Amino acid sequence: MSFTNICRFPSVEEILSSLPLPKHLAAIKKSRDQEIRRIFTREDQRFLLIIGPCSAHNEDAVCTYVSRLARLQEQVADVLMLIPRIYTNKPRTTGEGYKGMLHQPDHLKKTDIAKGLKAIRQMHLRALEESHLSAADEMLYPGNYPYLADLLSYVAVGARSVENQQHRLTVSGLDVPVGMKNPTSGDLKVMLDSVFAAQISHRFIYNDWEVSTSGNSLTHAVIRGSVDRAGNHLPNYHYEDLIRLAAIYEERKLENPTIIVDLNHSNSGKKYKEQPRIAAEVMHSRRQAKHLAGMIRGLMIESYLLPGSQGASGTEFGRSITDSCLGWDESETLVLKLAESIG
């Protein structure tokens, strides 16, 4: 075997004891979880926005952004629920490139995963303390979920992970909403198979234990567009796409049938400035069909302090080093317009 042991990975108990969640923040998170759950169970008619940078690579910039988001949340609280994206793992198509703060707590230095584990928990803790907004993160490594389980109010499973058995089974044991993205092929059946698998109970091996789960009824679909064999981006947010997905969803008779539309990635063709236009079209589609209004419960938006992106070695404060994002001014305008369109 060609594996080289570098260091022993810190246990969940070690990390949580060194960086505990204070009781007052645990209470805030519990309240937020209940509010978000009610959106998925249709007891709360507010619209959900999962919004923030493509990847969180700088704690100070992320916390500055999330604090601004908290002030914006106060303005739109009657109609919108904002969940900050604090994505600390970055899947890479070829395996090369920046893999997120878990791998590189300092994006200008070499990989240090043990240090990165502490860094991502510290960032989530600080963001919650300063904003009182519990966040979303992507599940790239299912076994790592316990390190952040007490802090996350939403989890995303990406297009490259959605077919993975361990992701599906792990999600079946979570008690927060989990969005399953359609795979890069755009196959809706694969996505809904993943939703179904996560909504039922399982017995399997997880972190050295044989475990059983009860199923997660809040697991749902996230559409993000697709890529064809020639590498072309194909959107799947148009009215006809939404009608088709809603029909398939209803045929499957899944619990709490919910669609979240990702405004960026292949839906925008990687053209981040298109996100406000796509949002307007999705909201128009909701108004055209009553069952879409009930099923489309939110949007994913890539947004940061500064617009666009910089290279992985960039040092501009608040500008993405991965996918391009809307800047703060455009993001604030978009959120306020969405609140107005719903209100």
Image (cartoon, grey):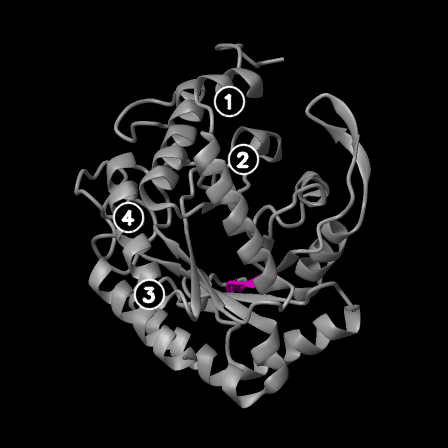
Gap between marks 3 and 1 measured at Cα: 39 Å
Q: Which badge, 2 or 1, comes first in the chain's sequence?
A: 1
Name the residue at 30% across, 42% down: 62
Q: Tell me: 152 left or right of 309.
A: right
Q: Quick one: which residue is furthest to the left in this view?
A: 316
Gap between marks 2 and 4 measured at Cα: 20 Å
Determine the secondary structure under disc 3: loop
How far across and down, in percent of the image, does residue 165 sit? 72, 42
Residue 59 to residue 217: above or below: above
Tell me which amino acid carries mark 1. Leu
Tell me which amino acid carries mark 2. Asp
Residue 173 to residue 118: above or below: below
Magenta region, residue range: 221-228
Residue 85 to residue 123: above or below: below
Residue 271 got which mark? 3
How far across and down, in percent of the image, does residue 128 sit? 39, 40
Q: Badge 2: few (under 14), some or many (20 or more) residues near its Cα, within 10 Å?
A: some
Tell me which amino acid carries mark 4. Ser
Residue named by callout 1: 16
Gap between marks 3 and 2 measured at Cα: 34 Å
Tell me which amino acid carries mark 3. Lys
Q: Badge 4: few (under 14), some or many (20 or more) residues near its Cα, within 10 Å?
A: many
Residue named by callout 2: 150
Q: Which badge, 1 or 4, comes first in the chain's sequence?
A: 1
Gap between marks 4 and 3 measured at Cα: 26 Å
Residue named by callout 4: 67
